[in-house]
Image (cartoon, rainbow, N blue to C red):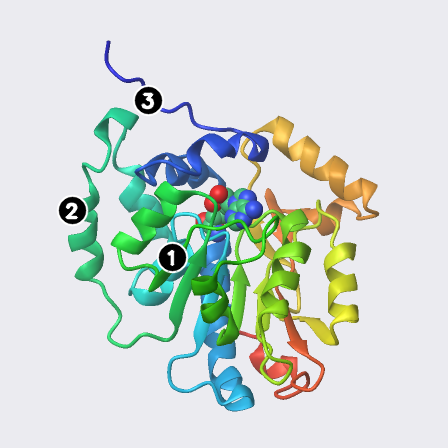
Amino acid sequence: MSDPAVTLPRHADDFGRVYDLEDPSPYYTALRPSDYRMPAVLAEASKAVGGPLRSARDAGDTPRLLDFACGYGAVGALLHHDLSMAALHARYGERRWRPVDGRRYWEADAAFFAARRAERAAFEIGGIDVAGAALAYAAAMGFLDRAFHENIVDHAPGDALKGFLEGVDLVVASGAHGEHLPAAFARVLDCCRDTRRPWFLYGPRPDMDWAPLNRLWAERGYRSESLVAEPIRYRKPLSAEERADMLRAARALGHRDEAVMRGGYLLADVVLARPEADAGNPPVERLRGCID
Ligand SMILES: C[S@@+](CC[C@H](N)C(=O)[O-])C[C@H]1O[C@@H](n2cnc3c(N)ncnc32)[C@H](O)[C@@H]1O
């Protein structure tokens, strides 16, 4: 019997089955109708804060970026290549990969990305994820300079990751489960010297509770500020059921429907958290304008 195709998820709760495959196409093909944009938004935001980050932290020419819950490495793919999110969706949407195909497309993908490699690396990129197959793909394609198959939500980081975290300048989370961020970010901070603590960039969506993360910022002497004047488009719901669930969860957290969805998209903020000593330099207004 031939190996069946992966059934594509139609709700965020069902995405687990496409997070850790030998090929990213089911993940991107499932998300394509939703116009999922966060990796591109956060890659642009990372570039926008890169200059100020280098001067505020004396970070050298190639600051070190950690992509938490990087999955197939979309943020690194965009930062290390001259490519758009639409191009990623198109590339992976062209094929109908099945588990029996294994790594069949790796060689062609590697050639595709090598031909589009950015001339200069804006960041040295490390990725963490619990999905080992996804990480292996991201590393093989050059989306990540370092890959860490670890769960820092539940466990302290190993020595290699600790070493990487000691020198990290910017931590990015795109599409990561909001409930994981307080524990993961606290672990990152525990590995950093008080004099060299990283900046954090993430896209809080209104159907998740951000109070625990905001408490972490207050406890650790961080200031979090929105990088956007208006919420940005996160993605469209994949089904009527998912839309209803998003609205229900956001209402329970006190949000009005108009602040949660616009033009069929779930909206989200884009937040930069910096140590109080770095905050205000430059003022967040100077970092705005690059993100839509
Ligand atoms: C929605 S995906 C986002 C992937 C990628 N950042 C993107 O935007 O395309 C969520 C990711 O969280 C990862 N994940 C789940 N639990 C995790 C944990 N405890 N530590 C690290 N990653 C985790 C999943 O394996 C998955 O790759």
Q: Quadrant of the N terminus?
A: top left
x and y percentages locating residue 90 in the rendered image = 31, 45
- SS of the residue under disc 3: loop
> Residue drawn at (46%, 30%), measured in percent from left and top?
17
Numbered label attached to residue 56: none
Foreground of the two, 39 or 87: 39
Asked if the beta carbon under badge 3 is closer than 8 A to the nearest atom of ligand 1, the reply is: no
Which residue does the numbered mark 2 point to in the structure image? 108
Foreground of the two, 266 or 24: 24
Direction top: furthest residue: 1
Q: Nearer the viewer, mark 3 or mark 1?
A: 1
Numbered label attached to residue 5: 3
Q: Nearer the viewer, mark 1 or mark 2?
A: 1
Would you call the spot at circle 3 few (<14 residues within 10 Å), some (14-19), or many (20 or more)?
Answer: few
Numbered label attached to residue 147: 1
Q: Is the C-beta separation of discs 3 and 2 under 8 Å?
A: no
> Which comes sooner in the sequence, label 1 or label 2?
2
Would you call the spot at circle 1 few (<14 residues within 10 Å), some (14-19), or many (20 or more)?
Answer: many
- SS of the residue under disc 1: strand
x and y percentages locating residue 156 in the rendered image = 58, 56
Q: CA distance from mark 3 to mark 2?
A: 21 Å
> Residue drawn at (52%, 29%), measured in percent from left and top?
10
Q: CA distance from mark 3 to mark 1?
A: 28 Å
Determine if residue 263 is in view.
Answer: no
Residue type of the residue flagged with mark 2: Ala
x and y percentages locating residue 76 in the rendered image = 38, 61
Residue type of the residue flagged with mark 1: Ala
Residue type of the residue flagged with mark 3: Ala
